Image (tube, coloured by chain):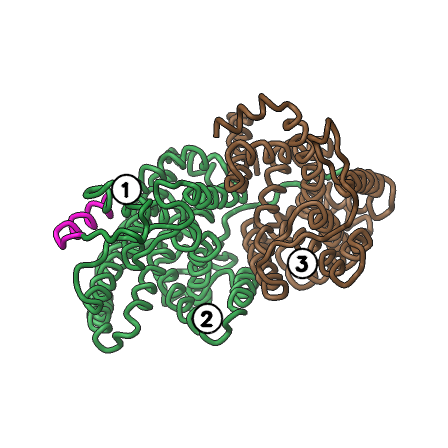
Chain colours: A green, B brown
Amino acid sequence: MSRAATYSPADIAIFVAILVIGLIVPYFVPAYTFQIAVLFLMVVFALTWDIMGGQMGYNSLGNIFFFGAGMYVSSVVQIGLFYDVAEYTAHFGAVKVEFTPAQYYIGLTAGIAAAALFAMVSAVALGWIVFGLRGPYFAIGTLGIAIAAGELVGAWDYVGGGGGMSLPVYPGDIQGRSYFFYLLNFALAIVTFLCLRWLYSTRFGLAINAIRDDEEKAEGMGIHTKRYKTVAWAISAFFLGISGGIFGNMTGFIEPLEVAFPTVTFGIFMVLMALLGGKGTLWGPVLGATLFHIIKEVTWTYLLGWQWVTLGALIILNVIFFQQGILGWAMEKWPKFFGIVVEENETVEQDTGGKSTPARVAP
Amino acid sequence: MLGNLSLLYLAPTLNIQLLLDGLFVGAIFALAAYGLALVWGVMNLKNLAQGDFVIMGGYIAWWLGTQGVHPLFGLPVAAVVMFGFGWLVYRVVICRVVDKDLFTSLLATFGLAIMLQQLLNLLFGPDTQTANAGFETLFLFDNQVTVTQIRLISLVLCLVLALGLVLFMKRSRIGQAIRATAQDPRAAKVMGIDTDRVYAFTFSLNAAICGVAGALVSMIWVIQPFFGITHSIRSFVIVTAAGLGNLPGVVLSGIGLGIAEQFGGFVLGAEFQQAIVVGLLIAVLIWRQIQMGRHRQVVQ
């Protein structure tokens, strides 16, 4: 399924169109700049989840950990470069700390770089723990890591504990601020997409697809599966760490449970978006994220109070009836359009291969 | 942190208090974990909504308590209502994911968990609640250790229920059918067992067990709509540590988890309690991995 990373004229036309639309949209609907910036964040979420969940068949429920870790590392670096962090968080709200524009931009750059680096390193370290786990244990183990991280950060006074911490204020007017962070998110989404597009066309993409299809056979063919798995996780952690750093600055205030490690919101959204669009495809997560974000905003507006119930129902419906996702469905319907040659008696399997083992009895 | 540790050393009775508290809650954890082991073993279903079933049972008992029904009488009601609810959930959702791959059932039950906790939140609000059973408190060791009678009653109920379940699975016709289905669904079908009904019954039985566990939790501890996920994780810790089909193991690790949580919460602070549970889960997973060593597909 991996297509070569060459750019046909049609591809270039699409990318240029997206680029132009993305750049001018804030001028036409300035009120929605924040919402659209969040949409790009969602695209990054879905794309990075899909590296593991869709392309490699490892369904992580805890990828949000890297988002939160990136957010906190970035904030600590941004503040720590110029002030004492413990003092800053202890005086939360009481002392107004000023950052000069130069300090702000240096801090932001260093913070995001540190966030990306930390996320990658922690992915490698955690990979050592979790990659021995298969199937549901992997999902539960990663979920556990994300929940534990939120709880632990909430009890850690150095970074403000459960009360959270506020970030340096953007040196500029509000309009400029929203456009600045909009552009950062937009750029991140584009870079993530292009990187993954290239990556899936290389040997690496083939290797992780092989792991998804049959890990034992892949290993038998000489693929160093553990190394590929770790690298794949580190790549998704890299982009998530950056997105965490950006999002923390965009909201201006971070807090462990709702903003940094929102396991049951963003952490599940990323799975749902990739599934909705079609996991294991390049455009699927983008499509799913866009659609999901629109659905979410509509339900949040019109079904206030019931939005979570709706969300839970949506997850169940999606998983039961529409697991192949929009693009997966389209591929089955019009395979020729996607360049898939369908032979008779052959079905496109995208399952994780989690075959049920003979169950044992509880006494 | 170290202050609390030395306190444990200086006041030995405090250890007894924590041990007993751990025993009482641990017995309930073991009950809910047994239900999880049941659906896991029989249907190969990992139910992430397990803890939310527990909390739902708790709210049924608590709500009946506010209506003037004693929570102990609310307990069988919770079991019956949850049995019916389990049947409904099976017919609507679970029967469609039983034969799918594992992640499907995990995600579907996760969706279910979100729905349940939010519905409970909408119905009863986000406050923590305790059903008031109105029993006396026993004072032991010069009044240094307190044990409420309801905790003793809950422990006895847990034991009776566990024993009843074991006998039911061993002796009764449907228990035999459940075990046959767990061993080999296809063979069971050939022998004339309606496996679909067996699955439905197993899932409903699990929900009823959770209902009882929840009613007990509501009496001796606190319930809150969002506590479900922690209960789910507890059940997973216990089942993963004990393995399927190992009832003594489930009971032991349930009580062990309860005690570990009490001590950990006391030494590190109550805000770490959830982190301790999750930390134990990760520790158990790592331990299983090391234990199984070179085997592939070990913990599948």
Residue B95 is tagged as 3
Residue that sits furthest to the left in the current view? A102
**Residue on which the image places disc 2:** A300
Amino acid type indicated by mark 3: Cys
Q: Residues within 10 Å of mark 1 (few under 14, many from 20)?
A: some
Which of the image's four quarters has the C terminus of chain B?
top right
Q: Which residues are magenta?
A: A99-114
Residue B82 placement (x, y as % from top left): 74, 57
Question: Alpha-carbon distance for marks 1 and 3?
Answer: 53 Å
Residue that sits furthest to the front in the current view? B142
**Residue on which the image places disc 1:** A85
Residue A228 in magenta? no
Q: Is residue B167 left or right of residue A158?
A: right
Judging depth in this view, the residue of A291 and B97 nearest the camera is A291
Residue at 79 percent of width and 56 percent of height: B74
Amino acid type indicated by mark 2: Trp
Mark 2 or mark 1: which is in front?
Answer: 1
Judging depth in this view, the residue of A26 and A12 nearest the camera is A26
- Tell me if residue A286 comes above or below residue B268 in the rendering: below
Residue A106 in magenta? yes
Secondary-structure class at tag 3: helix
